[in-house]
Image (cartoon, rainbow, N blue to C red):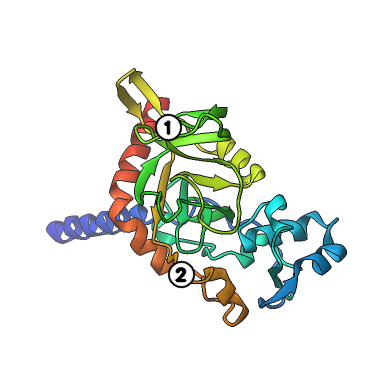
Amino acid sequence: MKKSIITLSFITLFLLSCKNETKEPTKKLPERKEPKNISFKLNNTKKWLEKNKNNTKILDIAYSINRVDKENFTKLDSIIIPTNLTGDKEFYLPFPFEVYSLNNVDKIIVFSYPTQAFATYEYGILTYAGPTSMGSKIHKTPTGLFFTNWQAEETTSTFNDEWELKWNFNIENKEGIGFHEYSLPGYPASHSCLRLLEKDAKHLYNWADQWELANAETVKIKGTPVVIFGSYNFDEPKPWLQLVNNPKALSLSENEINAIIKPYLNTILKEQEKRKASKE
């Protein structure tokens, strides 16, 4: 009888232990306004701007969908605009609002090459998203797992000393690759870096963590994980043009993000534990 009680107690403790390993998200979904429907159509840029040039929120959505900044937006003959603009920007971008496999990851940034967009997640919850302009056909941005290294409010490109990079956060020190504010023309145009709108670059600059060095040659603690994935078909029309016929053409499912993150998850969690331990 005593042996049975001991066995039952052991099983109960084992099940409770397993349950704790897959804890529920510690962060709640932020309140967002969802549009009644999501569809897109092409508009004449000049005519559309005449009606909406003073609406900051709507302009932010329009810039994001067309992957452009304010200056390049006016250069486009036609633009893709949602037929219903009552929702928050995240509803018009391709990322899922929750990713279960990231429940234990405190911070991560993901960049999608095919959709030219990025997102941040905190404990599996989408917290921020926006457009990007990644590497051109000649100078493709490398894909895989990276970590944020050093940052600078303003620095000069190692490739061209005439390029001033604002709100720069390096992710590949030897190659000089990072994300920062720079022109977004509506297609991948960079020299391997990840270009951002100024407000997005500032946000990531203040949100992500820098590395910690043991000495000039040794990284003690890595920064925030950054996963860059997919490829861009430079010989086809801009992929977001597909949204006119299919509003879900660019949508990334939770399962897709899970599969992309899976090969890197153990490394991400291991480095996260090192950072937490260094603060205790």
* Vertical order, 140 against 233 (above or below): above
Residue type for callout 1: Asn
Residue 251: percent from the left, percent from the top?
51, 70
Q: Residues within 10 Å of mark 1 (few under 14, many from 20)?
A: many
Residue picked out by circle 2: 253
What's the residue at 74%, 73% (across, down)?
43
Among the 4 quarters of the image, the one containing residue 278? top left
Q: Position of residue 160 (x, y in %)?
A: 49, 33
* Above or below 144: residue 231: below
Find residue 149 and name its label. Answer: 1
Closer to the camera in the image, 35 or 198: 198
- Mark 2 is surrounded, within 10 Å at the Cα level, by few (under 14), some (14 to 19) or many (20 or more) other residues, namely some
Quadrant location of the C terminus in the rendered image: top left
* Residue visible at 72% across and 76% down in the picture: 36
Please state if 57 lies on the left or on the right of 214 as rendered: right
Query: Visible in this render: residue 43?
Result: yes
Residue lying farthest bottom? 245
Indicate the secondary structure of the residue bearing disc 1: loop
Please say if the residues under marks 2 and 1 sit with CB atoms less than 8 Å apart.
no
Q: Residue at x 45, y 31 (%)?
A: 158
173 left or right of 60 in image: left
Q: Is residue 3 above or below residue 239?
A: above
The answer to whether 156 appears left or right of 47 in the picture is: left
Residue shown at 37%/39% (left/top)? 272
Residue 193 or residue 261, whichever sits in front: 193
Q: Amino acid at mark 2?
A: Ser
Can you tell which quarter of the image residue 245 is in?
A: bottom right
Q: Earlier in the sequence, mark 2 or mark 1?
A: 1
Q: Secondary structure at mark 2?
A: loop
Which percent across, then down, holds residue 184? 60, 51
Can residue 280 be seen by looking at this rendering?
Answer: no
